[in-house]
């Protein structure tokens, strides 16, 4: 195994990181987990400024998935952790990578489709205007700007703007499944707001495609090509599980239970298109929601 096939991966123990690590290993890459909030060898800590620079030298690529979980109630302290972990952690990595003697060929960093704002009248793609109006849009703005030292240092940089990742083993779908399996699921907040989604295997495949395709740089919408309304999502999930799915959860209940986090996620209109992936030749394994959900619940 040559050093140019070595991939540094932050967030390796998370839902996406575990699946991605397995896929990259099967393709012959050497995957080296790089621990966040770690002051020892093989890690970095945005709180202290520590980073194991030697571990990064000569790597083929760095894939940055780490960050404080968004799926929590947003107290001021939690919002500070969410923003700081993404902005400062990414900046520490990007700045260090730009100063290496043997820089990586590519730096892939997670982001989110919240970069386009929280409410939109049409489905947006990578050429659409961005927004920092709202907490998550401001976080994604700071997150993406923190990668600039890497791109300015000549490293091909890809911003993976993702959305709801469908997996029965983690993330939002795992939290929904118990209620839907009991026939207690349904549309949220009226059900008219749109959401983007992607199956976990397709997300992993898209990351690998971006890694190996030199033409891919800048923003890349990591979403499936068919956004749906909340009502359509609930109806499709119920059909896949063969359970009724008509019990609504009103918007006021979401706001009461989850506060700003609920208003900016499940109550936002977050439709986006993967135009760059489609025009670049990427093919989704499960481009429609029903097939993606069938695959997810069969995990």
Image: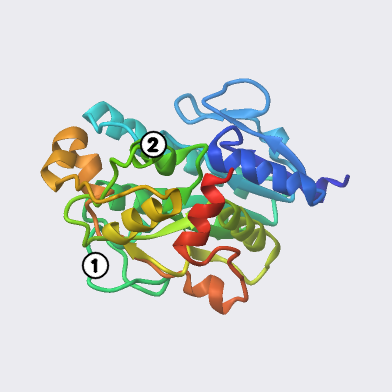
Up the image or down, 203 lies above or below 100; here it is below
Q: CA distance from mark 2 to mark 1?
A: 26 Å
Q: Which residue sits at x=72%, y=34%? A: 54
Q: Nearer the viewer, mark 2 or mark 1?
A: 2
Label drawn at residue 26 = none
Residue at 48% in and 24% down: 48
Q: Residue furthest bottom?
A: 279
Residue that lies at the very extreme toward the left in this rendered image: 252
- Residue 174, quarter of picture: top left
Asked if residue 145 lies left or right of residue 187, the reply is right
Q: Which residue is mark 2?
A: 175
Furthest residue in direction top, as rendered: 40
Q: Which residue is mark 1?
A: 120
Left or right: 60, with 237 as reference point:
right
Query: Crowding near pointer 2: few (<14 within 10 Å), some, many (20+)?
Result: few
| Pick the front one: 66 or 168 | 168
x, y (%) of residue 271? 33, 65
Identified at 28% across, 74% down, the residue is 122
């Amino acid at each position: 195994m040559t050093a140019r096939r070595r991939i540094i991966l932050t967030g390796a123990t998370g839902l996406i990181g575990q699946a991605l690590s397995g896929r990259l290993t099967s393709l012959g890459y050497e995957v080296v987990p790089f621990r966040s909030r770690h002051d020892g060898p093989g890690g970095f800590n945005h709180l202290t400024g520590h980073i194991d620079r030697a571990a990064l030298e000569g790597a083929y690529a760095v894939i940055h998935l780490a960050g404080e979980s968004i799926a929590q109630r947003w107290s001021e302290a939690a919002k500070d952790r969410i923003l700081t972990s993404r902005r400062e952690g990414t900046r520490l990595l990007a700045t260090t990578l730009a100063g290496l003697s043997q820089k990586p060929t590519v730096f892939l960093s997670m982001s989110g489709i919240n970069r386009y704002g929280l409410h939109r009248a049409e489905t947006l793609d990578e050429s659409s205007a961005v927004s920092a109006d709202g907490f998550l849009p401001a976080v994604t703005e700071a997150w993406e700007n923190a990668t600039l030292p890497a791109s300015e240092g000549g490293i091909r940089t890809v911003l993976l703007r993702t959305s709801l990742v469908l997996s029965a083993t983690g993330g939002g779908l795992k939290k929904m499944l118990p209620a839907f399996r009991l026939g207690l699921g349904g549309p949220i907040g009226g059900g008219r707001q749109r959401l983007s989604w992607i199956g976990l295997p397709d997300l992993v495949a898209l990351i690998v495609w971006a890694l190996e395709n030199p033409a891919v740089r800048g923003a890349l919408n990591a979403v499936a090509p068919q956004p749906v309304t909340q009502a359509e999502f609930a109806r499709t999930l119920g059909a896949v599980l063969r359970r009724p799915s008509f019990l609504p959860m009103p918007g006021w209940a979401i706001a009461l239970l989850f506060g700003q986090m609920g208003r900016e996620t499940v109550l936002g209109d977050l439709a986006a298109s993967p135009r760059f992936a489609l025009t670049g030749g990427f093919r989704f394994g499960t481009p429609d929601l029903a097939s993606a959900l069938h695959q997810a619940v069969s995990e």
